[in-house]
Amino acid sequence: MVSTTGFDKQDPIPPYRIITNEVDLPPKTAAWVLFAHFVTTVTPLYMMWVVYEHWSYLLEHSFSPHMFYVAAAMFLCSSPFEVAQNNIDTWYLTEKCGSVYGVGFCDFLFWFFMILGMVALTVAARGDNVWLVGIACSAIVVYPFVYLLRGIPYPALALCGIPAVLAMYAIFGDPLIFFLVIGPSAVLMYFITAIVRTGAQFLHGFATLSAGVGFLAASWGMLSGITGRPHSWATFIIVCMVLLVVGVVLRPTILRLAPTPHRIAAEDQNTIC
């Protein structure tokens, strides 16, 4: 009999099979989703580059430039926990998964580091503003309660995310910075709700990239503000309206997508005993 659950002295499973059995997605879908996670994981490096290249400007205009590095480091630290939670969920997202509406230890740590990153951004930009810093820091206290008791991170994320973008906008003056919270909230949930309703797992890649693109846009806003070429509010509103219209138009088509087949279940059916 072919073993499919672990090592067997007579018929051991090769290590690569043990690893691939942790990803319950078809190969092409798995490659796309994993690639999206890799790209999103490294996006905070762009902020680090902006800070490094324009250190003198930040010394003059921000409260604590070093905290921008801390913020980027916190965002970098959050990604491995999100990947770990996905791995626990075998990368096949359902409503009850810790990666979606459920709870999980790695998911808890993922959002915790995201919140720490937002708080660090607030301190970096306007650490002298007691109100902004106080509201942002309150998220650190609120988060364990809302997550452990209610299983939702978003109230705490709003508590620290809104002060963070307001503080950064006060320094850089570019509305693209607001995509820092739009990406990981509205756009992310657009795709997550679609995954739950359809089971189309390739949307997971777009959900992940939405957070990464939001972070890149915010970093680009920093750079534009530093170089004296901030984007206008008209540009920001037009981009948001285009995204909204595209999202509304594509929604019916997206919700008709077929569910992604479980790769592991399909292979088990083909196992010869």
Image: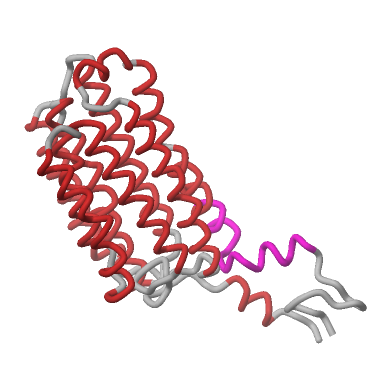
Residue 173: percent from the left, percent from the top?
13, 26
- Majority SS type along the magenta span: helix
**Residue farthest toward the right in the current orientation of the protein:** 10
**What kind of colouring is applied to the model shown?**
secondary structure
Residue 272: percent from the left, percent from the top?
79, 83
Residue 86: percent from the left, percent from the top?
49, 63
Q: Quadrant of residue 167?
A: top left
Residue at 40%, 43% (x, y): give it: 74
Residue 151 vertical placement versus 162 (above, below): below
State left or right for residue 89 relative to residue 20: left
Quarter of the image with the C terminus is bottom right
Quarter of the image with the N terminus is bottom right
Depth check, front residue: 83 or 76: 76
Residue 271 vertical placement versus 189 (above, below): below
Depth check, front residue: 256 or 167: 167
Residue at 30%, 56% (x, y): give it: 188
Q: Quadrant of residue 25?
A: bottom right
Residue at 29%, 76% (x, y): give it: 149
**Residue farthest toward the left in the current orientation of the protein:** 234
Query: Is residue 17 one of those drawn in magenta?
Result: yes
* Residue stretch rendered in magenta on the structure: 15-32
Query: Is residue 118 one of those drawn in magenta?
Result: no
